[in-house]
Amino acid sequence: MFSKVEVFGEVPLARFGHTITQVSKSKVILFGGATGDTGKYIITGDTYGLDLINNKWSKLEVSGIAPSPRAAHASCSVDSL
């Protein structure tokens, strides 16, 4: 059963085609996707983190060369190689 959770902080816009990847027991990362409506949308390259303990979103600034904006992609978290 699902329940609605109130979130705080820099909440990302509604989107589709994004990825959300769990990177620890208490944090997930949202990347990319498209905002807008079918046929009239913008592909994004923004990155957000959600603290699952405090239900707080924050927009993350990447360093170095950021991935290009994308939607309908995949992601995963790897502990070590």
Image (cartoon, rainbow, N blue to C red):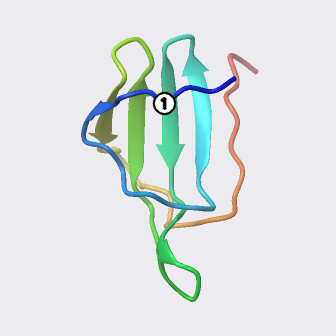
Task: Estimate the x, y position of residue 17 in percent, counting from the top left.
Answer: 63, 61
- Residue 18 lies, with reference to residue 70, above or below; the image says above
**In the image, farthest residue toward the bottom:** 39
Residue 79 appears left or right of 53: right
Badge count: 1
Residue at the image position 48 percent from the left and 30 percent from the top: 4
- Residue 81 lies, with reference to residue 64, above or below; the image says above
Q: Nearer the viewer, residue 79 or 16?
A: 16
Q: Determine the image quadrant of residue 54.
A: top left
Task: Label 1: state its secondary structure.
Answer: loop
Residue at the image position 71 percent from the left and 17 percent from the top: 80
Task: Estimate the x, y position of residue 3 in percent, counting from the top left.
Answer: 55, 26
Label 1 Cα crowd, 10 Å radius (few <14 / some 14-19 / many 20+):
few
Task: Estimate the x, y position of residue 21 in percent, counting from the top left.
Answer: 61, 34
Residue 22 appears left or right of 81: left
Callout 1, which amino acid?
Answer: Lys
**In the image, farthest residue toward the left:** 9
Q: Nearer the viewer, residue 64 or 62?
A: 62
Residue at the image position 36 percent from the left and 29 percent from the top: 6
Q: Determine the image quadrant of residue 25.
A: top right
Which quarter of the rendering shows the N terminus?
A: top right
Task: Estimate the x, y position of residue 45 in percent, counting from the top left.
Answer: 44, 61
**In the image, farthest residue toward the right:** 81
Q: Which residue is mark 1?
A: 4
Which quarter of the rendering shows the C terminus?
A: top right
Q: Nearer the viewer, residue 63 or 28?
A: 28
- Residue 52 lies, with reference to residue 56, above or below; the image says above
Q: Determine the image quadrant of residue 33.
A: bottom right
Residue 50 appears left or right of 37: left
